[in-house]
């Protein structure tokens, strides 16, 4: 089949879609700006709810999509709309004429330093969910290794549900990620006190509630319903966290060896760049705008341009994979229609 | 929808200060008053947001709304761009207007506050003025303030102030025509009316409590009962 | 603490502060408690740095304290402020600088409210005309007086006679800075450095040779709380908040505290006296307190002015240990004298807090 299919982004959405298209007999092209495949998931250690190694997911996806034309370290320089197709110029000088673009540019992790009151990048013992996964993977992080680990806190909703941070949306995965990471830390440091500061616990997915129950029952993680208001550093370099325990209506102050900020998902600047070049609309939440947010989230309003994964909003791994499969089918039917 | 909520909504501080509250407690967590008093700004926001007339009326008649120090620390942190401190100001304003402030001990303090502060503004053109800031009422101001005010013309002159003098400078005498303008501003903007309202309701309350106005002033200025603080039994 | 992290944030909050031609309005509290500071502000700006700062005797209180004590309606305070703006307009200025933080916050809030609700501005213009027959322009630039000293900090450093260095150890002095709540907590972009890590005082301290120390309750209010201080029955609120700050900064052994708000230095100075007398606890060395300075006092000291000319004798906490550390010359016999050596006797000595 001669039709070119350009997939922008080699994260799990791009890889899954490519694998499906390969099995349908197409030869998709994957454009990936970094030097590796798998996107954010490749940086993660284990995935909820079954603690599946993220590495296994990524390597299986990479194996299944290996026959695609994959350009690593490559960016889109510009996109020209031709009469009934697009001309995509790549940073490596290659240009591709295609009728089909699948945008799988994903999300960016919210820059936690923007929540100045939490002191990320200012106080030594404040890290993010991503930093912690990195430590799970490599064991390398002075901040975690040296802290003695008597008390650890997790702050939910960092850069999510926050109009001041210009991200009113819920990032969906942080609640369960915090519970997962809290359990993992408890497994490594059984004597440490672990606190989760949350506004609402959104345990919507398969077996999430079981995870939460286990965190409380088996690991003694303390859940405090209150958004953290301020973080400061004391003379020992430990961090002091202020929140209200809203269920008892009292301000609380906790001193911690390590504070983990659950940085949320924001639309990736790469998505916005591609959207600008291909003249795709952006939705009021900052993510790419679908044809219909209920009935047809994977179609863009532009002819031949489709979406899969977190470029249209925060999603879990299984949701992203399901969407990638649906997008592959959509592309297939679209090509059939062209013929 | 009842009328107290509508009255509040007319206040620009409510328009600016209460969009939608998510009850996250960010405001209470760093509130200097919440740590000291039995006070929770989040609950104030929740009650106003509920539009429950009965609850709002209770709030306006309670000590609760008078605990805030108006430091506005809550404004910096609210993730929904609310300003609980601004909403408190609107509640206090309405409580003063309707005379509900006399129903609570902390509310009744509006009487000495109004006497002192509006008196200073209209008489001297300053909010705080040495002639009315007496060491006897402010022993925490220390022996140095006692000494300073006992020798005030000399101590002020020593540091180059123009105390009660003509022309510009530190603590100069503010010209009568400027004081007259302040008075007219009070008259046309509701400032004078507010003073009269506070006076009227306080007078009635003093009578009910069996006190003359001087006794009522001392009582409301100095007395505190033992049920306001977090560590009270 | 990662210093570079703060620098990044500071870079995001640099407000425009014109170099010259300001209309100056005074602070009620400062004129009472720190009269020397306002005199020194104009002395430094006008006579040392040769800038144009205009003051009219016809300006008054902005009404901010009365407003935050809930004794005057919003329209009253807005119209008083509108009159101040009219005085500026009539004098031909467009840069407005306030000595007071409550005023600064008050002006910023009012301008913002007018911007968001133009019908309010129209109404206030009518009320001002009715009461005073005056008209006004909104200032093009609004600054707090500490913004200006921050702006001029390097010019002051170039003329400085003293550096903020402990002459016995050669180490930079350890300085705690305290920012008035209404400086940037309502409008972070209106303050140099923003609300979380304000740079306005840090910049002065660094420029003049000291080391800024951060401590957990740095951002906490001094405890003024308006009605929580002015009413005698409420003053425990004020005291307990100051106490909380001192307990938090105590392990760092600061040499002094620098403030930019009128009330804060008064409360942090006087409540130390109260804590000493009631609890027997002092926070400086050898029974002394920690001196709490205004930014003008500090600027004047580094420029070499006589401590008693700038009003350091009006502090309850003795400043002499700090003067000694820096090596500033002073005559102890002159401390409580009036003009022309007039004998004014001296304040009584507190029972616990050591004073000179």
Image (spheres, grey):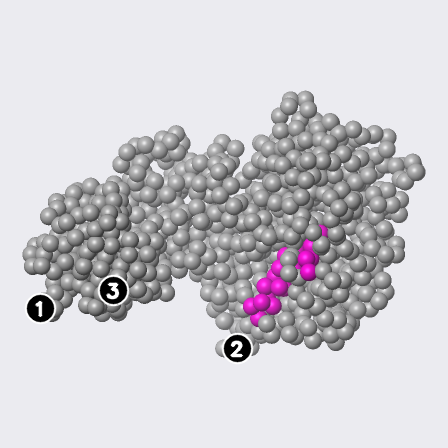
N-term-proximal mark, 3 vs 1: 3
Q: Which residue is labeled 2 in the image?
A: B2
In this rendering, do the residues under marks 1 and 2 share a single chain?
no
Residue C302, position as x, y percentages in the image? 72, 35
Q: Which residues are magenta?
A: C94-117
Q: CA distance from mark 3 to mark 1?
A: 20 Å
Q: Are marks 3 and 2 in contact (CB under 8 Å)?
A: no
Tag 1: Cα neighbours inside 10 Å, few (<14), some, or many (≥20)? Answer: few
Please state the chain letter of the residue tagged with numbered disc 1 in the rendered image. A
Under circle 3, the secondary element is: strand
Contact (CB < 8 A) between labels 1 and 2? no
Mark 2 lies on a secondary structure that is: loop
- Please report the residue visible at 36 percent of the width from the left and 60 percent of the height from the top: A286
Q: Nearer the viewer, mark 3 or mark 1?
A: 3
Whether residue B61 is visible to the viewer of this picture, yes or no, is: no
Point 37% across, 50% down: residue: A110
Q: Is residue B128 left or right of residue A324?
A: right
Say if the magenta span includes residue B188: no
Q: With respect to residue C114, does C227 lie above or below?
A: above
Label 1: element kind:
loop
Left or right: where does residue C279 sit relative to residue B14? Answer: right
Identify the chain of the residue marked 3, using the numbered disc in the image.
A
Give residue A81's mark. 3
Residue C107 falls within the magenta-colored stretch: yes
How far, Cα to Cα, is label 1 from label 2? 65 Å
Q: Residue furthest top?
A: C168
Residue positioned 51% across, 65% down in the render: B18
Residue C165 x %, y % = 66, 28
């Amino acid at each position: 089949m001669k039709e070119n299919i350009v997939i922008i982004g080699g994260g799990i959405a791009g890889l899954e879609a490519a694998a499906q298209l390969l099995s349908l007999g197409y030869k998709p092209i994957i454009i990936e700006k970094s030097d590796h495949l798998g996107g954010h998931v490749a940086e993660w250690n284990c995935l909820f709810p079954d603690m599946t190694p993220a590495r296994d997911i990524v390597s299986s996806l990479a194996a299944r999509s290996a026959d695609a034309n994959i350009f690593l370290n490559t960016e889109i320089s510009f996109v020209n709309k031709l009469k009934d197709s697009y001309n995509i110029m790549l940073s490596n000088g290659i240009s591709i004429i295609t009728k089909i673009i699948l945008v799988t540019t994903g999300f960016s992790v919210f820059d936690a330093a923007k929540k100045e009151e939490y002191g990320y990048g200012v106080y030594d013992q404040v890290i993010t969910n991503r930093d912690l996964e990195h430590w799970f993977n490599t064991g390398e992080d002075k901040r975690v290794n040296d802290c003695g680990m008597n008390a650890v806190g997790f702050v939910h909703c960092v850069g999510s549900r926050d109009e001041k941070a210009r991200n009113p949306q819920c990032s969906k995965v942080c609640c369960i990620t915090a519970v997962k990471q809290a359990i993992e830390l408890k497994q490594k440091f059984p004597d440490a006190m672990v606190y989760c500061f949350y506004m609402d616990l959104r345990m919507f997915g398969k077996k999430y509630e079981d995870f939460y129950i286990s965190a409380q029952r088996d690991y003694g993680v303390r859940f405090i319903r209150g958004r953290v208001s301020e973080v400061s550093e004391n003379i020992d370099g430990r961090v002091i966290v202020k929140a209200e325990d809203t269920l008892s209506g009292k301000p609380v102050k906790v001193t911690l060896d390590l504070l983990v900020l659950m940085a949320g998902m924001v639309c990736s600047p790469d998505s916005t760049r591609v959207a600008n070049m291909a003249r795709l609309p952006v939705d009021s939440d900052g993510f790419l705008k679908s044809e219909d947010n209920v009935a047809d989230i994977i179609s863009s309003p532009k002819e031949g341009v489709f979406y899969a994964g977190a470029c249209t909003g925060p999603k879990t791994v299984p949701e992203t994979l399901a969407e990638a499969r649906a997008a592959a089918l959509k592309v297939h039917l679209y090509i059939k229609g062209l013929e | 929808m009842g009328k107290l909520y509508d009255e509040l909504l007319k206040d620009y501080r409510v328009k600016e200060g209460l969009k939608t509250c998510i009850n996250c407690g960010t405001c209470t967590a760093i509130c200097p008053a919440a740590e000291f008093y039995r006070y929770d700004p989040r609950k104030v926001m929740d009650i106003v947001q509920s539009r429950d007339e009965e609850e709002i009326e209770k709030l306006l008649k309670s000590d609760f709304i008078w605990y805030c120090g108006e430091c506005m620390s809550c404004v910096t942190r609210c993730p929904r761009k609310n300003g609980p401190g601004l909403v408190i100001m609107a509640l206090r304003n309405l409580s003063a207007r309707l005379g509900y402030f006399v129903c609570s001990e902390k509310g009744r303090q509006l009487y000495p506050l109004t006497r002192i502060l509006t008196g200073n503004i209209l008489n001297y053109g300053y909010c705080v003025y040495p002639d009315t800031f007496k060491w006897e009422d402010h022993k925490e101001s220390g022996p140095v303030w006692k000494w300073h005010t006992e020798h005030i013309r000399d101590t002020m002159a020593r540091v180059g102030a123009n105390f009660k003098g003509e022309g510009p400078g530190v603590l100069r005498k503010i010209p009568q025509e400027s004081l007259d303008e302040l008075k007219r501003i009070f008259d046309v903007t509701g400032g004078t009316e507010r003073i009269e309202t506070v006076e009227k309701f306080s007078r009635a309350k003093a009578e009910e409590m069996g006190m003359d106005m001087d006794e009522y002033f001392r009582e409301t200025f100095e007395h505190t009962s033992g049920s306001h603080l977090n560590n009270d039994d | 603490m990662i210093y570079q992290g703060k620098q990044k944030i500071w870079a995001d909050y640099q407000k425009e502060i014109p170099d010259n031609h300001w209309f100056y309005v005074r602070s009620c509290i400062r004129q009472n408690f720190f009269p020397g500071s306002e005199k020194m502000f104009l002395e430094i700006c006008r006579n040392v740095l040769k800038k144009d700062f205009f003051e009219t005797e016809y300006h008054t209180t902005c009404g901010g304290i009365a407003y935050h004590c809930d004794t005057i309606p919003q329209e009253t305070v807005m119209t008083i402020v509108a009159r101040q703006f009219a005085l500026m307009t009539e004098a031909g200025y467009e840069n407005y600088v306030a000595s007071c933080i409550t005023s600064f916050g008050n002006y910023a809030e009012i301008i913002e409210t007018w911007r968001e609700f133009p019908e309010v501005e129209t109404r206030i213009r009518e009320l001002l005309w009715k009461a005073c027959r005056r008209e006004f322009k909104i200032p093009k630039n609004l600054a707090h007086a500490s913004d200006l000293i921050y702006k001029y900090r390097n010019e002051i450093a170039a003329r400085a006679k003293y550096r903020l260095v402990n002459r016995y150890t050669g180490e930079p002095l350890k300085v705690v800075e305290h920012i008035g709540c209404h400086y940037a907590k309502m409008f972070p972009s209106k303050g140099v450095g923003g609300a979380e890590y304000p740079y306005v005082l840090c910049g002065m301290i660094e420029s003049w040779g000291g080391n800024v120390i951060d401590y957990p309750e740095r951002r906490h209010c001094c405890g003024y709380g308006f009605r929580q201080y002015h009413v005698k029955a409420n003053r425990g609120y004020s005291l307990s908040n100051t106490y909380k700050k001192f307990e938090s900064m105590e392990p760092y052994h600061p040499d002094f505290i620098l403030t930019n708000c009128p009330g804060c230095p008064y409360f942090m100075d006087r409540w130390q006296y109260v804590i000493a007398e009631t609890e027997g606890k002092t926070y400086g060395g050898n029974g002394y307190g920690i001196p709490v300075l205004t930014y003008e006092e500090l600027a004047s000291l580094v420029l070499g002015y006589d401590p008693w000319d700038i009003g350091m004798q009006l502090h309850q906490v003795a400043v002499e240990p700090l003067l000694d550390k820096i090596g500033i010359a002073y005559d102890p016999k002159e401390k409580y004298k009036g003009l022309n050596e007039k004998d004014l006797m001296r304040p009584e000595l507190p029972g616990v807090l050591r004073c000179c």
